[in-house]
Amino acid sequence: MVGTRLNGNTRRVAVILLHTTLVAASFWAAFAIRLDFDFGQVPGDVIWQSLPLLLALRLASLAYFRLFRGMWRYVAIPDVVQILKATTVSSIAFVLLQTWLLGLSGFPRSVFLIDFAGNILLLAGIRLFVRVVRERAMSRSQTESAGGRLLIIGAGDTGASLCSQATTTSSFQYTPVAFADDDRSKIGQTIHGVPIAGRISDIPSLARRYALDLAVIAIPGASSSRKRAIVEVCREAGVECKILPATADLVDGTVSINQIREVDVLDLLGRPQARLDIGLIRGSVEGKKVMVTGAAGSVGSELARQIVALKPSQLVLVDRAENELVFLESEIKSVVQPETRLTVRIVDVTDQPALLRLMRECYPDSVFHAAAHKHVNLMEDAPSQAIANNVGGTLSVARCAIETGADNFLLISTDKAVNPTSVMGASKRFAELMIRELNATSSTRFVAVRFGNVLGSNASVVPIFRRQIERGGPITVTDPDVERYFMSASEAVGLILQAAAIGKGGEVFVLEMGEPIKIATLAETLITLSGLTPRDDIDIVFTGLKPGEKLAEELTFTGEDFADTGLDKLWVYDDPQSETGMVSAAERLLADLPELGENAIRNRMAELINGYRPAATGALHRGPSAATTPARIPDVAELPGG
């Protein structure tokens, strides 16, 4: 500690002595320049009389503006601004005191201006000299080390900042050797000594010319289609490609080499992120008691992460998936604030007595109901489980919310609830209609949020496709034309929280999902991101649509009126279907469920849910123009020998 302090003190003394020398040199040079370097005419007595006053003022001003403490190796424009301020203040004070105390006899007036400019030049110049020498040394060291050669794609502010950091950070093992940018006016120029060598389409030739090892996309505002094109060009050139975050992910526009990451499928297939009203969301959560069911799932866990950051007084996480809930609890505990009480419980949402006991312990203000069976194929084979969990579980949680006086209840719904062809979709539509009826008969505000698939969620196509690629393929896709809506879990949850904040009760909110994405395109993109070529390295096999699947999903029913909420990418719909009688119908269906066969369950659902056409009819739903007359399927008990 003593040695470190002495070293620091020694350095500060050396810096002060150097500044003293530079200030004196600038003052003497000002006289020499004014007198055309006729050294015999330089008034030494005037200089020695005025110099102590100037030194005292200059050094005091430099100390006030903290110019003895900066690390010169990182000098930048803000440091030069501080030098300008310190010199201006001390020069004004010097002019006034020199005139008042010592007079101007024999003192050329122009010396004040010449010394002002010289002081700035010397103090800024010595700092820039140190930085340039250090960066040159680091550049030679990086070139000689085992690190690679870097191409920066995008010669804008982000690219320039990345280049600067790459050349001044010794731990970064890549040396910037070239930029690529589609602005023709920039080509041929340099940034920090690195040439803007060509357009993005020239990357294959740049890769050969500069022996590139890595390319980084430094265009935060680039569209998904542009990123896809860049990744494809890099793949063809045999250059590894990484990316910096999107504009919305940069804090105050600051770029760091630590933010360089792998290109993700969301970068290439996503869309501009929604602008969230954080103040609105915070006001609806901070200091409140919030419960999340299905907390171990993709949406539920993201709800937990975003809600805990908003400092609720209590966060209650409920799921029946034991292992996943343990992992989530560990994660949330590492970030939870002291003012938030965390409660984590294993509870099945269909167990209403157990759920009610838990909710009577905490009396939540808000309930986010994300617990559900979501996989179409599995639910087609187990319709009783879909009804028990998605209908029975929703009714159970909703009744407990009413019983404990919750202020609001939000149901996580799905685009598969629109004109459903699957048991899963029909069960979620049933849940939508039930909570609308409950909203009309209780003080709890019930709303639903309907959206498409979460990209990269548990057991979604993305992790499945990645495992298939790791095994060498093939990737299996049901149909060349099948397409789905996708968004990130973080964006979906942000919009869900906004819907909960503005919901008055009875609304069905719909998230703006952008354009649907063909699953085949998603598969090709993942293959490309793996550095492989679709169909050459990894084949894509089409297996045919499974029962209950659609070629294309829909977010709204025909006839639903929508209104703009005033919030980005969040719409509210007026559902034309009557919601009366759905709760009693659910009670009867749940009571009969143990005795019903699979087809009988589908038939009952078809009678209750307008537009539901059971998949066993063999008709594939292709959109809202399809017929909506329910089709009845014989129950197993009605078949010969059943």
Image: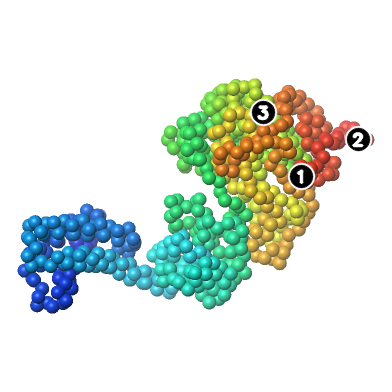
Q: Residue at x 14, y 61 (%)?
A: 54
Residue 263: quadrant of the picture: bottom right
Instruction: Kindly identify the residue that appears in the image at 22 percent across and 53 percent down.
Output: 64
Quadrant, the N terminus: bottom left
Apparent side of residue 103 relative to residue 272 in the rendered image (left or right): left
The span from disc 1 to disc 2 (Cα, nearest Å) is: 32 Å
Kind of residue at badge 2:
Leu
**Amino acid type at mark 1:** Gly
Q: For marks 2 and 3, give the CA distance.
A: 37 Å
Structural distance between the alpha carbons of marks 3 and 1:
25 Å
Q: Secondary structure at mark 1?
A: loop
User: Please, what is the three-letter code of the amino acid marked with disc 3?
Assistant: Arg
Dots 1, 2 in contact, CB < 8 A: no
Q: Nearer the viewer, mark 2 or mark 3?
A: 3
Q: What crowding class fits label 1: few (fewer than 14 Cα within 10 Å), some (14-19), or many (20 or more)?
A: some
Colouring mode (rainbow / by chain / secondary structure / one colour): rainbow
x and y, in percent, of residue 278 in the image: 49, 40
Q: Is residue 425 visible?
A: no
Identify residue for label 2.
639
**Numbered circle sitting on residue 436:** 3
